[in-house]
Structure formats: structure tokens, C-alpha cells
Image (cartoon, rainbow, N blue to C red):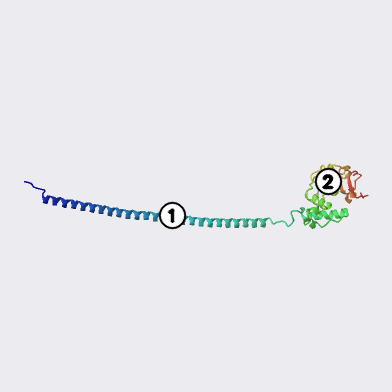
Amino acid sequence: EETGMNPVSNSNNSNADLVDAELIDEEADRRRLQETLEGVLHSQDAIQVVDVEAEDKLKRERQRRNLLIYLGIGIVLTVVIVTVVVVSLQKAQESLNPPTEMPSSSPTMAPTTRISAVQMYIEDKFEVTIPHIEDFASMPAEEFSMLPRARAIQWLTEEDTTTTFPFESEEDEYAFYDRYVAVVFAYSTAYTAWNDNTNWLNGTVSTCDWFGLSCNDDGRISVIDLASQNLRGTIPSEIGFLEDLDFVFLFRNELTGTLLGD
């Protein structure tokens, strides 16, 4: 007759439960340890990644800084080279084309030998004195404009193409002589403000074809007809030296001076 539970069986069951609990705890401990190790390893990997990224960033920054330094050096060298080249070219240009000492505001002059010769001829023929030719170069343009004789010499030596000097014939001298008188007259009476100044001071047109002038068969000025043409200024003494001049009409203008001659 079975009167109760088997004590041996109960003891075995308790032992089995105890072993299972211990195994479960060990398994849990093992998992926790594994998780801890994995966490540590993951942290180390993360640290390594961070270190690599920081190193790469530092390397890129260093490369960028070096690039800027090289670029700056290149710019400085380029500027220095360009400056040296420009200065060298300027010096070479100056050596080939030395600057003139004549001020830009002063009248330009023909070669001194020729213009001086023309001046000497004019002074001798017309009994006038003209400031030395070298004084014209340093003279202000405004002051120069007040010297009709000097301006006439300049025009004859620089702009006139119909006369020659030195002369090749007597006819050449007559043409030059009369042309000088006409040019002095134009500058003395403000020809640019005349009512009609057709062909006046046109270096390619004969003096006989300037408005108001007529010439005889020898090509010498014989008539000056510029009445009522708004002439203003002083009649130059050179008019009296026109050897073939027969008639002069200058009324109704604002002129001073007298006509002298043979």
C-alpha cells in the first residue's frame, strides 16, 4: 500500500531544478560578458574611426594650407616677373625713342637749321626782328599765338607744300616772299573769324587762290580785296613790301595800322 510520495524522487527533482538554475545563471553571465566584450570592441572601433577621420581632416587642412602658400608664392613671383619685363621694355623703348624736351603745350618746330635759315631770310628782307627760334619751343602756346611772324615761319616750314626753301629759282623766291606776307596778314587779323577765309592757310593751295587775293601774270599778289570780312587786329608792315600790289580794299573792318611801301 502506497502511503505517500517517494522521498528520493523529490530530492532528485530539487537537485535537477538547482542545476538548471545554475546553468541559466551561467548562461546569463556568459551573455552579459559577451555583450560587454562586444561593447568594448565596438567602442574601440568607433574610437579608431574617429581617429582616422580626424587624421584625414588634419591632412586635408595641411594640404589646403600648403596649396595657399604655394599659390601666394606663385602670384608674387608672377608680379615680380611682369614688373621686371615691363620696366625692361620701357627702358628699351626710351633708349630707342628718347623723349623730346619740348613741352607738349608749345608749338612744334621744323628742324632748327632750316627754320633758322627761314628766320634769317625774313628778318633781312622785311627789316624785322623775331625772337630767336629756340625761344619758341619753350614759349607757352598762348604767348606764341600773339606772334604772327613766328607763327608764319612755323607754318611755312611745317605745313606749306607749295613753296621751296632754299630757292631753286627767282620765281620760287617771289612765291615764298608773297606767301609769307599773306600768312603774317592772316595771323595778324584773326583769319579764323573772317566771314570768308576760303583756302587761307591751306598748305596745298596756291596763294593766288586764297579768297580775296588776286595775282598778276608773274604770280605776284596784285590785289587784296577783303572789305567787310570782319577782320580784326593790326595791319602788318609786311603788306608794304608786296612789290606788285596795286589795290587794297580793307574798309568796313576793325583794323589799325597803316600801309607803307613804295
Report which quarter residue 249 is drawn in.
top right
CA neighbours of label 1 inside 10 A, class few (<14), some (14 to 19), many (20+) = few
State the SS at label 2. helix
Please name whichever residue, 36 or 15, is drawn nearer the observer in this view of the structure.
15
Please name whichever residue, 109 or 77, is drawn nearer the observer in this view of the structure.
77
Residue 166 visible at all = no
Please name whichever residue, 120 or 239, is drawn nearer the observer in this view of the structure.
239
Q: Could you tell me residue 216's position as x and y percent?
A: 88, 42
Q: How many marks?
A: 2
Instruction: Kindly give the residue lying farthest to the front in the view shown.
Output: 3
Q: Is residue 113 left or right of residue 73?
A: right
CA neighbours of label 2 inside 10 A, class few (<14), some (14 to 19), many (20+) = many
**Residue occupying image coordinates x 80% and y 57%:** 135
Q: Could you tell me residue 197's position as x and y percent?
A: 83, 43
Residue 76 visible at all = yes
**Residue occupying image coordinates x 67% and y 57%:** 94
**Residue occupying image coordinates x 86% and y 55%:** 123
Residue beneath disc 1: 57
Identity, as a three-letter code, of the amino acid under mark 2: Tyr
Q: Is residue 3 left or right of residue 107?
A: left
The image's mark for residue 191 is 2
Identity, as a three-letter code, of the amino acid under mark 1: Lys
Q: Could you tell me residue 81's position as x and y percent?
A: 57, 57
Q: CA distance from mark 1 to mark 2?
A: 84 Å
Q: Which tag is nearer the camera, tag 1 or tag 2?
A: 1
Instruction: Kindly give the residue lying farthest to the right in the view shown.
Output: 262
Q: Is residue 255 left or right of residue 136?
A: right
Report which quarter residue 193 is drawn in.
top right
State the SS at label 1. helix
